[in-house]
Image (cartoon, rainbow, N blue to C red):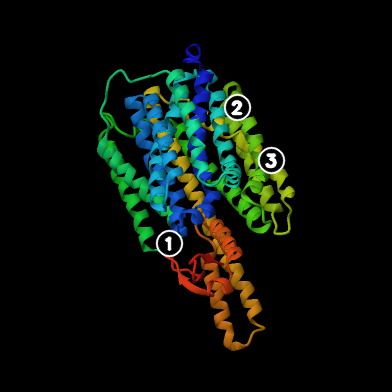
Amino acid sequence: MSRWRGNPWAVLLTLSLGFFMTLLDMTVVNVAIPSMIEGLGASLDEALWVINVYVLVVAALLIASGRMGDLRGPRTMFVWGLVLFTAASVLCGLAQDPGQLIAARAVQGLGAAAMVPQTMTIIIGTFPAERRGAALGVWGAVAGAATIAGPTLGGFLVGAAGWRWIFFVNVPIGAVVLVMAVTLVPDSRPGVRRGLDVPGVGLVTAALFCLAFGLTEGQRYRWGAGIWALLGAAVVLLAVFLVYQGARQRGEPLLPFALFRDRDYAVMNVVSAAVQVGMLGLFLPVMLYLQSVLGFGALEAGLVMAPAMVVSAVLSPVAGRLADRVGGKYVLMGGLALFAAGLAWLAAVVDVGRAWYEFQPPLLVAGFGIGCVFGPMVTVAMYGVEPRMAGAASGVLNTVRQIGTIVGSAAVGAVLQNRLAASLREEAAARAASLPPGVRGGFLAGFDDAAGAAWTSGPGGAARRSGCRRERRRTSPSTCGGWRRRRSSTGSSTRCCRRSRSPSP
């Protein structure tokens, strides 16, 4: 393999495999929640933390790890992150209780946060500016492919081998990528060893953790005072961080403000966040419709979405190469227009009575647009960034993307819950008119409780429904001693089997 050392495309393949693993683990776990609840005896809150702790750790540490790549060398950070991620995957697969699994997922998130910013940094250092668009197009294709491959691959692995294999599958891939990284990726280190801005790392990590936690958990805790206190703390900590960084600009700041003097970089950060919000607005409701209304399994729903992602993955490198020739902003504008057109078309045709194949034309248009967005967007953002600040630039851009994903998930969840509650209330009020006056109040109150409990932030609502269906099939009031009411940690009321204490709808 030595003759391939330093080959740009061999380096890109190595980085893409590692990047794919980290993004895949953000979505592959979602479909395994019912199996985890059953296999580990976990509560719904514990199962959701298996997902959220990974997202929180990654979002909080991307900026710090990107800058550490600038200071210690991006390959070094990538390799150590890969080792940590792979070892944590083993621990996840061997976990015997929810606490062990959540702790292992936190370590896995730490490894992913160390890896992700380095992928973009190494690509920028490996490919000359005139060939960078095609490489970043591949990078964007990997991001798009991981989005759809998670539910599809997760559904297959859970059905064929059990939930533990969604983690064990990382081990052989991680071992191969580790060998490739050590033998193929050049070790570029800074000429002068510089110190890390430890107070800056502490401030930005705390701020991003508070922000990500508040947005991720807000829906589940009904946007109570504690959530708003966390979001307020995030704003204060970010303000303190920016003031502190302003005083360090002549030294070695964690966040060089010079990055944002590049207008293209500053604008692409905003575009990146908006695209992530749009993608959640596209995929999450459609996936919920396919599974909750049409009754599709996770694997089937993933396959319905696959054509759009295949189009996106195939087109993204082509769009990147085109961006090298004609300019990234023109390809990007065309992609954004197509993506918006696909979303508008989907909104126009979506209806409860629609079949899955009627969604394909607008989804394909949106996928075509996404394929023209990711590669050119990163190309435009990073074109004017100096190599010595590439890690910081990559960390900020990936952090903004991650926060956009979290904001999109929270916004879609809030809208869906609002509409569900309003629809249930309206329908219940219409039906209550035919009931005796003495029972109308209790009837309406029951529907209010159902609306409040029907949606849990992120994929947990679907997980709870799936877990409930399994429990109902296994038990009944006659076999377990009857159902009783139980209050969950969020205050919602659920029916539970007296013997098994498992939630039922």
Relative to 235, residue 132 above or below: above
Q: CA distance from mark 2 to mark 3?
A: 17 Å
Q: Inspect the image, locate mark 1, and give the three-letter code of the amino acid beneath it.
A: Tyr
Of pointers 1 and 3, the one earlier in the residue sequence: 1
Disc 3 crowd rating (10 Å Cα; few below 14, some 14-19, many 20+) is: many
Q: Is residue 413 left or right of residue 293?
A: left
Image: 415 above or below 314:
below
Residue, x 49% and y 43% (percent of image)? 26
How many callouts does the rendering have?
3
Q: Residues within 10 Å of mark 1 (few under 14, many from 20)?
A: some
Residue marked by disc 2: 317
Residue 73 in which image quadrant: top left
Sequence order check: which comes first, mark 2 or mark 1?
Answer: 1
The residue wearing badge 1 is: 221
Q: Is residue 111 left or right of residue 371?
A: left
Question: Which mark is drawn over residue 364?
Answer: 3
